Amino acid sequence: MIFDRVENIGNYKGLGKVFTALEFMANTDFTNIPIGKYELDGDNIYYMVQKYDTNPDKTIAEAHKKYIDIQYIVKGEEIIAVAPIQ
């Protein structure tokens, strides 16, 4: 897991599609994009705009074997936990 700030995306230039996604994220005003799923590079890179109320008592674990998940909290707060996929 990488935990960082968007201002530091230059540190990830060598990461190919990850950098493409981070650069898009850093240069996009997500507050003006309707809720939904959008393709950036077909099925290779896509993003989802969501709006929801967080609830730390109702945490749902998730794991990814195919995709890398980049979480970008535009407004509010979120608790993000991490654990090995096993």
Image (spheres, rainbow, N blue to C red):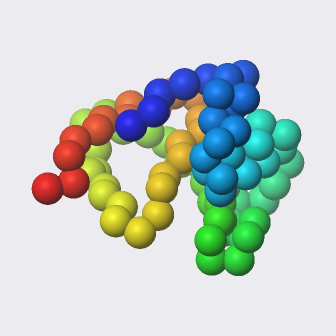
- Relative to 76, residue 28 above or below: below
- Relative to 46, residue 53 above or below: above
- Relative to 55, residue 68 above or below: below
Q: Residue at x 54, y 47 (%)?
A: 70
Residue 8 in picture, x, y percent from top left: 67, 23
Residue 23 in picture, x, y percent from top left: 76, 43
Q: Decide which of 59, 29 is in the foreground and name it.
A: 29
Q: Is residue 52 left or right of residue 47?
A: left
Q: In this orientation, does residue 54 appear? A: yes
Q: Residue at x 72, y 22 (%)?
A: 7
- Relative to 35, residue 15 above or below: above
Q: In this orientation, does residue 30 appear? A: no
Q: Which quarter of the picture shows residue 27?
A: top right
Q: Decide which of 48, 25 is in the foreground and name it.
A: 25
Q: Residue at x 61, y 46 (%)?
A: 15
Q: Is residue 69 left or right of residue 80?
A: right
Look at the image and tell me in which quarter the C terminus lies: bottom left
Look at the image and tell me in which quarter the N terminus lies: top left
Q: Which quarter of the picture shows residue 45?
A: bottom right
Pick out the residue farthest to the front. 14
Residue 36 in picture, x, y percent from top left: 68, 66
Q: Total of numbered circles in the picture? A: 0
